[in-house]
Image: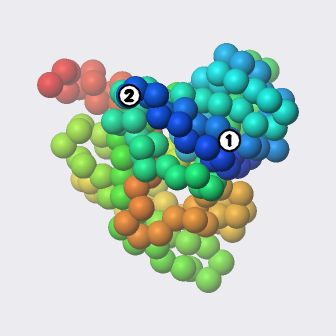
Amino acid sequence: MFTGIIEAFGTIEKITREGTNIHFDLTSEIGYELKVDQSLAHDGVCLTVVQVEENQYRVTAIDETLRKTNLSTWEEGKKVNLERCMPANGRFDGHIVQGHVDQIGKIKSIEDQDGSWLFTIGFDDHQSNVTVEKGSVTINGTSLTCFNSKPGEFTVAIIPYTYEHTNFHQLKVGDSVNLEFDIVGKYIQRITQGYS
């Protein structure tokens, strides 16, 4: 389980295709602390560390992951948000994040608020995912509060600290982002609407 509080950046150094899988080799300041078989969220996608050498490590994305996330668009040199799993005795600073991306969203607009930024995100609302006003959402692994919630769209406000310490400072209008909707909301929706 994750909390959506980004810990560090990872930089993609090498991308290797093997059948339908893609191996990503990354470097990070936390690379020295990682171990094989550890779960690590990359832009909100839970991936297993399969190799570690000094500050460089490797994770592998399978076809299912590549189809449901924006990982297939990643390029060498890209910075991604990293979060290790929450320790059992840790503080719960964000919200419950599983590291299981529900769908890809697109940045519709970025508005500079002279000290903060408003990002409006669009998504396909036919996939039964919803946001609620002042509810939680995870964008590229970052726990955020959404507002202006409507079918297929919501807005988040990004403070300077989050802008600098996550990859929000790299995002542009039209970019795709990984979205994980609030787990409590997903369970309530499933209970009230059933399976479709």
Quick check: 106 left or right of 157?
left
Q: What residue type is labelled 2?
A: Thr
Q: Which amino acid does label 1 sit on?
A: Leu
Closer to us: 152 or 99? 99
Q: In which quarter of the image is residue 32?
A: top right
Quick check: 6 left or right of 168?
right
Name which residue lies at 65% across and 21% down: 50
Question: Nearer the viewer's eye, disc 1 or disc 2?
Answer: 2
Q: Which of the two discs, 1 and 2, labels the residue nearer the N terminus?
A: 2
Image vertical order of residue 169 relative to residue 47, above or below: below
- SS type, badge 2: loop
Image vertical order of residue 18 relative to residue 10, above or below: above
Tell me where residue 129 appears, x and y as whole percent. 30, 40
Can residue 133 be seen at all in this image of the molecule?
A: no
Residue 20: assigned label: 2
Q: Quadrant of residue 143?
A: top right
Can residue 37 be seen at all in this image of the molecule?
A: yes
- Residue wearing tag 1: 26
Using a 10 Å C-alpha cutoff, classify the residue at mark 1 as few (fewer than 14 neighbours), some (14 to 19) or many (20 or more).
many
- SS type, badge 1: strand
Image vertical order of residue 54 relative to residue 28, above or below: above
Distance from label 1 to label 2 (Cα)? Answer: 20 Å
Closer to us: 59 or 175? 59
Name which residue lies at 60% across and 29% down: 59
Closer to us: 129 or 52? 52
Residues at circles 1 and 2 in contact by the CB criterion of under 8 Å: no
Tell me where residue 171 appears, x and y as whole percent. 52, 65
Tell me where residue 85 appears, x and y as whole percent. 68, 27
